[in-house]
Amino acid sequence: MVYDYLITLKKRDYRMADQISQLMYVFALLTFAYFYYHHPKAGAVYLFIGAGVFLSWAYSVIKKSKKGEALFRLGLFICALGWVLGPERNVWMAILYVIAGLLEKQVKFPAEIGFAEKEISFNSLPRRVLQWNEIKNVIIKDGIITVDQKNNKLYQKEIEGYVTADIEKEFNDFAHRCLVAANPREELS
């Protein structure tokens, strides 16, 4: 769907997601070291996987220090390989690490709200869609978007970047027109 307005929300703090990914690295590395110690010849794969995880970790930490954010998913996928390829095969742990790697990208994806004449769409997992007839009011004021639903749920978030007064007025006029079209008999605030 093509949206008339696509609002990008202010970035969230990803420290918790990064810490969980790194904790999963530590757990895998300690486990792989234990398995290698008990199976030095058969467990050589753990040595190579461990080196791959460590290098990926170092790369992500350096990238984060330079750019302010990084993905730790490559190391999680390498850990998943270690869980499957080593002599102590554990498919469930591999699946857990793959899911964590896939979810990390979604968690760190910039939050956006798309506004079209027919609907309002939130790019969350799962995708959330609201129809204009479910909404009491939508407004941007002072860099904050507010979506007031008829079921008394209120959604308020800070917008990424600066919103000029002209764009604010243009968006608020668009939202008002959509609300009037979806609720012709109701008096809107």
Image (cartoon, rainbow, N blue to C red):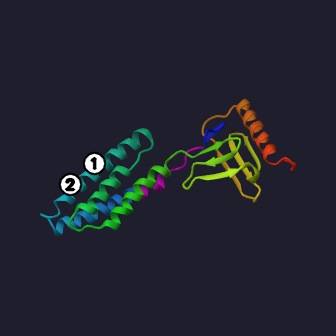
From this viewpoint, which residue is outermost toward the left? 41
Q: Is residue 189 visible?
A: no
Q: Position of residue 131 (x, y in %)?
A: 71, 50
Residue holding disc 2: 48
Q: Name which residue type carries label 2.
A: Phe
**Picture layout, residue 1 above or below residue 47:** above
Residue sitting at x 31%, y 48%: 56
Q: Residue at x 29, y 67 (%)?
A: 90
Residue stretch in magenta: 9-20
Residue in front for this viewpoint, 35 or 177:
177
Q: Secondary structure at mark 1?
A: helix
Q: Which residue is mark 1?
A: 55
Q: Position of residue 171 (x, y in %)?
A: 72, 36
Residue at 34 percent across and 58 percent down: it is 25
* x and y, in percent, of residue 40 in the image: 14, 64
The secondary element bearing badge 2 is classed as helix
Label located before the other in sequence (1 or 2): 2
- Image side of residue 174 versus residue 69, left or right: right
